Amino acid sequence: MKTFHCDRCGSLVFFENTQCLKCGGALGFLPDAMDVATLEQRNDQLWQPIAPAGVQTYRQCANATQHQVCNWLVPKDNPNPLCEACALNQLIPDLTVAGNQDRWHKLEVAKRRVLYTLKDLRIPPGPTAARKQAPVLTFSFLADAGTGPKVMTGHNNGVITINIVEADDAVREQRRVSLNEAYRTLLGHLRHEVAHYYWLLLIEGSPHMDPCCKLFGDPSSDYAAALKTYYQNGPPADWRQRFITAYASAHPAEDWAETFAHYLHIHDMVETAAGFGLSLKPKHPAAPSMSTDLKRVELNSRSFDDVVAAWFPLTYALNELNRGMGLPDVYPFVLSDRALDKLRFVHHVVQQSQQA
């Protein structure tokens, strides 16, 4: 995402911050302005951004005042006590259980990053003119309960359910290794499940359906049987030539979800790099293929090839920097021509679906 700065002292601040670490100024995210603002308190409930002058006043989200898990603000005239991100929650964890508030906070941080990207792409989390009857995107963050059925992370008709045990780093890493996944994060989970929702919203029953099926396959094929085969036998030997991840090979619906999730990964990382003014100009024989000026990339241009041309050098640099710290690659994937065709299609659908 773009870079943010304190309006009082000019210091760099971050999307999740509630206070400037240099001057101590209170901070909050303004969804309508897509900006982290430095705030002045007007009374017990109202806050006003110090810049630009004359903007409206806001209230803190109830999940900030009661649970300290949110930094998004609510316009004072909005009767909903929750911000637009928290208002999408159907269910939250039982906060009387030790550790659940911290797990929920981690999930909220990831969820708000996903929602920021969706807002930046101008694809709404709810009905569109073309899909007036579509459900609103909502979230349920749940825990396993005793000997009852396990909570399954997934999407169903607009509701994204996440088992909050995924917020425990040790559990999530154990599952990543046991399932032989190159990448498993809360942000990745949410982007993947959100992608299933956007199949429902942007593809199903639309003019995009036929070309999508030609590229990804028939989504009506037996899903349960396909997953059973995948978990028993693993991906096909040539999956790297046809799919963006191994799991994408399990079923066309998962191929779409993995590809859309990676599209969100790429959009967010390129925008962040551009916000920091990054340019790459290595001095070695491969320099032409490793050079890029991220500031010049137009994320919402009609050409996805320009984004890809910037993305590859960025991943090379980021992966090598991580290796220098003994950490896993930031982006441990290789994009085949077929995977790029699918990403390019997602970009086209997003472009066609954007709202003013």
Image: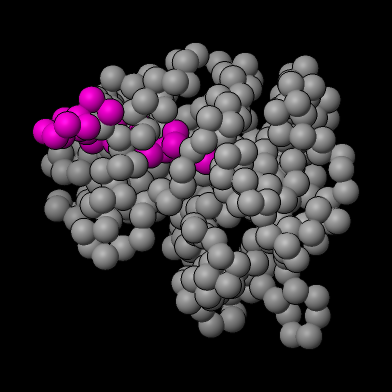
- Asked if one can make out residue 194 in the rendered structure from this viewpoint, the answer is no
* Viewer-proximal residue among 128 and 227: 227
Which image quarter is the C terminus in?
top right
Q: Is residue 95 magenta?
A: no
- Asked if one can make out residue 11 in the rendered structure from this viewpoint, the answer is yes
Q: Position of residue 85 (x, y in %)?
A: 56, 45
Q: Please state if 19 lies on the left or on the right of 125 as rendered.
A: left
Q: Position of residue 233 (x, y in %)?
A: 73, 62
In this picture, which residue range is highlighted in magenta? 262-289
Q: Please state if 49 lies on the left or on the right of 181 as rendered.
A: left
Q: Please state if 48 lies on the left or on the right of 183 as rendered.
A: left
Q: Position of residue 75 (x, y in %)?
A: 49, 37
Q: Is residue 40 above or below residue 68?
A: above
In the picture, residue 40 is in which quadrant? Answer: top left
Q: Is residue 264 magenta?
A: yes
Determine the residue located farthest toward the bottom in the rendered image. Answer: 147
Q: Is residue 69 above or below residue 51?
A: below
**Residue depicted at 26% across the width and 51% down the height:** 320
Q: How many marks?
A: 0
Model colouring: one colour
**Residue depicted at 47% across the width and 29% down the height:** 120
**Residue depicted at 68% across the width and 47% down the height:** 249
* Viewer-proximal residue among 42 and 112: 112
Q: Is residue 95 above or below residue 256?
A: below
